[in-house]
Image (spheres, coloured by chain):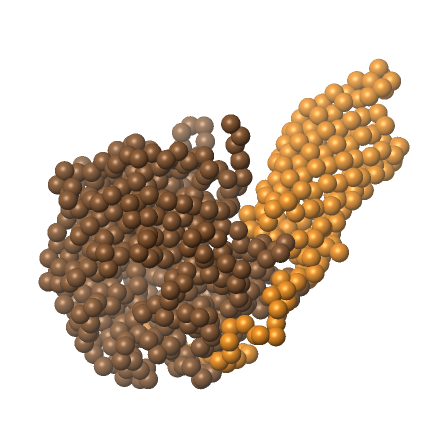
Chain colours: A brown, B orange
Amino acid sequence: MKINLNYPLSLCLLLSVTFSYAQQAKTLMGATHRMSVKEGGWSDVDGIGQDETGLYYLLYPFSKVYSGTYIGNKDTYVGKVNNQMELERFELLPLDYEDKQLELEFGFQLGGNIYLFSSFQNNLLKKTFLFAQTLDKNSLAPNPDLVPVAEIDYSSEGRYKNASFSYKLSDDNSQVLLVHNLLDKDGSLLSFGYSVIDSQLKTIDKVEGIALKDDGIYSFQDFYLSPSAEVYMLTKFFDEKKEYKNSVQLKKQGVLSSTRSFELEAIYDFKVLKFSKGSPTPKALTLSLGDLFITSLDLKPKKDGGLMIIGFYSDDEDALADGVFTQTVDKTLTKILSADKKSLEGKFEQPSKYINDTYVTGLLGKRDDLDQYRFVMKDILQKKSGGYVLTAERNTTLEKTQNDGRSITVYNIYHSDDIVAIDVSAAGKINWVNKIEKAQETSGLLTLYSSYEVAEYEDSLIFFFTDFSSQNTKTLGKIVDTESVMVTVNASGEQTRQTLFTASEDKITVRAKNTYQPQKGRCILYGHNGQLIVGFTEVKF
Amino acid sequence: MKKIRLTLFLTGILTSYAHAQSDSTSLSYYFDDGGISTGTMYKTDLISIIHGDWPIIAEIRLKNNLTLEMGAGLLMPYYVHDFLALAFTDNKGIQNDRLGYSTRLHVKWYTKAPERNYWGVQYYRRSFHHVKVNEWFFTKGDQRIIGKRLILDMALGLGVRFQQTNGPDYMFDPDFGFFPIMPLMIRFGVIP
């Protein structure tokens, strides 16, 4: 048999087998599909769009997922999962123009089209360009409608620096904010700019080459797009460069890291900058809680203008959260319209499962190692009722040394444990703060299976994640015992926990991948077992 | 909380409502980099020159992240032994007073195209008039584009060397060696 090594996934053997799942949750589970792939296939997927016939994914190789050096397949594929959960088709994604190859940045659905965004570094012009093109949903090939939508000019930097693109969709999916950054070797911003474009790729607003300079250093946190196309930026500001560099080092070590909330000392302030269409000068607001220290926060532009801010505070000189707070700010960033706060009452001082001595025995992390933690947040969810929800998970990264007598190995252990959910009314009052118990101690490949997904269904929040038992990390990444869980939290904050299925060594461990379909009342879970088995399964509510 | 002064310098702010793509600008403008991303690079190796080998090396792109270096060099009538090899062994070096030639092949896998870090495997052969030296080694390097068309490529290798005396000299000085090496490479080049 002739084997085409350029297309390793063509060796896939499709197996129609079902997930093994727990008896009590059978009614939740819809169609499942599972397949084996040759080693060297993709390591992760991202949903980029959906229609009535199925869901569309980008299938990433390891080199896209891991931050470290990886020698191997760098090809990205596009796949379609039909309503029977079958990976109906997947195709190599060629991104090129004549003899020039483009680098895939991201893809998403805007209006009725699925757009693929890719970049090209032109060393003659000293610019990195971002292009958009539509995806043909039938052939899964990019259409030849390449359009430049953004650029990064690094001509003033002497030589190439790291160009970085990111995006944020508007809540109604009609506009997108494209952010482009130029980073130095420490990961700090040299310059940034943004474009706001509509679903026809028409530019609504555009700002280039903004440089922040001060005695201290800004740490970029996130950009936000309001319904009226105003752009906000959240920054963390350090006046001590040395401390900031320490925080950058932490960022580089964390596979699970976001750009938010990595410092464990009270050495920074949060500043919000607002860029208005047609105005070259942003307004700035330094957030304050009086004597309390703001450890981390997220914000959401409100439909009626202004901001909803939800975050965590510390009541002493460290950056460990003691409570949660909200503030609503008017659209001129001059008035605090409402404020509220609530203590966490020590509920997150240790991961819940670690209270149990039996559970601790098998794990690599020691209880004391977990005293220092941070909350890694997801974007604030705006509820249909008009309220808001911020969710975050308790996170710690530990460095461990293993000495087997012949060699010494230093590796990281990642803890993504309990989830905090903060429900806030439209007026900014904290309705409830909930803890959802989760235990994810991971290292190596297993880290890809941690974290969680959250969606709003009717008046409830639905969380998906995989709990790892104490037997997992002893094998350093080999999955031996997991439990995939769905937790429902109703409008009053009451929790219902259901096991979707359990998986032993030869079964798939799921990762929810942002493929919630509210119109169908279902969520599609993506599963993976090492590099060999992948699958999709449906959960009906 | 310490009050922190915010000074925000905005440089080159351009606000416009123009369409994302200027109608008058064709796509070729964005991709015309004078062949820098696709062209063949030509280099020489400073460390090789110190050791008596004057090479010309061409690096061609096979894929976006995969390149092949092919080089040929002239062995000059002098030889400076590499100190790292001496550190590993009691090899006494090569006495060379004639011309010779060298060849090399180097497959490089860039972790980020088209420059920066790479991993590679190199075969390097030097044919002195009385000794053949073959080396195989893995490389870890960093290649930078300086300005628009100048190349600086620095790498460290780890591998093995096979060294064998040829012809009549073998009768008088049988020198067969097999030992580890850790070669350093510093290469300058240009993208024409």
| Left or right position of B116 against A474 | right
| Left or right position of A463 against A403 | left
Q: Position of residue A21 (x, y in %)?
A: 20, 38
- Residue for point 49% across, 72% down: A193
The quadrant holding residue A250 is: bottom left
- Residue for point 52% across, 63% down: A145
Q: Position of residue A355 (x, y in %)?
A: 17, 45
Q: Position of residue B183 (x, y in %)?
A: 67, 38
| Of A301 and B79, the residue lying toward us | A301
Farthest residue, direction right: B98
A471 shown above or below B191: above
The quadrant holding residue A220 is: bottom left
A43 shown above or below A284: above
Q: Position of residue A116 (x, y in %)?
A: 46, 59
Q: Is residue B61 visible?
A: yes
A173 shown above or below B14: above
| Of A444 and B77, the residue lying toward us | A444
- Residue for point 44% across, 70% down: A200
- Residue for point 12% across, 54% down: A495
Q: Is residue A295 visible?
A: no
A230 shown above or below B60: below
| Left or right position of B110 against A133 | right
Instruction: Give the mark count.
Output: 0
